[in-house]
Amino acid sequence: MRIINTRSRTPRQIAEELARPALGTAEQEAAVRDIIEAVRARGDEAVIEYTRRFDWPDAAPDRLAATQQETAAARDEVGEDFLAAVRHAAANVRRFHQKQLPSDWMDLAHTGALLGQKFTPIERVGVHVPGFTAVYPSSLIMTVVPAQVAGVPEITLLTPPGKDGAIPAATLAAASELGVAPVFKVGGAQAIAALAYGTQTIPKVDKVFGPGGIWVMLAKKMVYGAVGIDGLYGPSEVAIIGDETADPRLIAADLLAQAEHMTDSPAYLLTPANDLVDPVQSEIDAQLPHLSRREIAREALQRFGAVVLTKDLDEACAVVNEMAPEHVQICTAEPFAQLAKVRNAGCIFLGSSSPVPMGDYVIGPSHVLPTGRTARFSSGLGTMDFMKRSSIVYTSQQVLRGNLDTLRALADLEGFDAHLRAVQARLHRS
């Protein structure tokens, strides 16, 4: 990993130096736009065309939905131990997200005025579960369970099939265990377009959720407005803040756990402890050969890994705030002392016994988190992402009269005389 010293640069300059370039070329954007327009215009015909081209050569409209027989076979294949793991993880995720449920409220704010809010689940959501270089039942759990907690009545799952038309058994079995149906064998940009506009087979939804590669991200960006989207997620990333007490073996393991996602997954160590750097690198070299995805992890660390040497922990936190990364891991003598200083992060892991994989798989918060510095203005996926907030207003004649002069001043200034007349009409009724 390259080493960067903050001596001559500000935290913002460091973050900008490490920031990845914007994802998606003009050619990729044009190709995704063509797919979206084709699916919008031709429905199933276009979905089948692109599914045959990219995933499953024998795709057909009447074979897109997973069958009960396929689901039963998937459950048998994964076995009871896996299904028990799904139940355990889902229970933790459900417990965490139930605490996020909002409450409707009403307030007699003024005599004769009743104000409030009500929260309503989105009616139809679509969830895309990726499947490019690995199988991701965890992404299914982390997206579907918050939707169920919110009370979403219709959840449609789409995930890419293999060349044989089969959905990975773990994904299909997890969907079954969570009670999700229908499940369609479609992935990529064509899946997002199908959810946004609907086809003869795949229902149109109100909001699209779930991570994916560049084609999925660009498609979500382009269909926004026709449907809602949860966010635009790039490569997974971690920033680890460590001091002289940090264990190099654990830091290396955590960096590698991040780097094995994909070859473009950033992993950073920020530390004022110069003596930590070489031991961490030695541990990386020692641990890499034992990983099944070692070539992916090696390339990720070579291309997007970095050690940032800071003057102290305060500066390390300042750099992290400019990075606004998906995961922040604090491996210091007093991690809770640094917590208040970290303002921009998708999820914060405190202490050496709190590795990011606990969040990825089982402990509770959804692992669908903002990436690429978007934690400056957005949050991890939560219960409220599957709900809408409606304001409630009741005003009496007394309140109309009491606010008439203020309303008149603003309406006159903006030139909206019909607004004023609509209020006056209620005060001058016989």
Image (cartoon, rainbow, N blue to C red):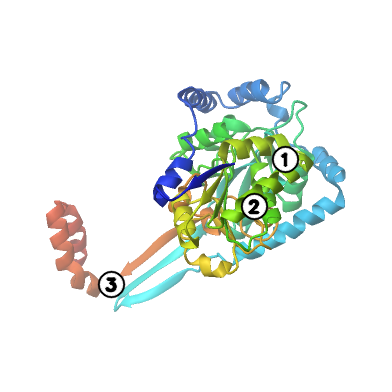
The answer for how far apart the CA atoms under marks 3 and 1 are is 58 Å
Q: Quadrant of the C terminus?
A: bottom left
Relative image position of residue 225 (x, y in whole percent) = 43, 40
Q: Which residue is mark 2?
A: 142
Find residue 409 and report its image quarter.
bottom left
Q: Are marks 1 and 2 in contact (CB under 8 Å)?
A: no
Quick one: label 2 or label 3, which is nearer the N terminus?
2
Q: Nearer the viewer, residue 49 or 276?
A: 276
Q: Quadrant of the N terminus?
A: top right
Q: Does any portion of residue 147 appear in the rendered image? A: no
Q: Which mark is residue 135?
A: 1
Element type at mark 1? loop
Element type at mark 3? loop
Q: Nearer the viewer, residue 276 or 294?
A: 276
State the residue at coordinates (65%, 54%).
251
Tag 3: amino acid: Ser
Tag 2: amino acid: Met
Relative image position of residue 32 (x, y in whole percent) = 51, 27
State the residue at coordinates (42%, 72%).
106
The answer for how far apart the CA atoms under marks 1 and 2 are is 14 Å
Quick one: label 3 or label 1, which is nearer the N terminus?
1
Relative image position of residue 128 (x, y in whole percent) = 62, 40
Relative image position of residue 424 (x, y in whole percent) = 17, 63
Find residue 402 and report its image quarter.
bottom left
Q: Which residue is mark 3?
A: 396
Element type at mark 2? helix
State the residue at coordinates (70%, 31%).
64
Tag 1: amino acid: Val
| Crowdedness near tag 2: few (<14), some (14–19) or many (≥20) residues, C-alpha within 10 Å | many
383 lies above or below 36: below
39 lies above or below 318: above
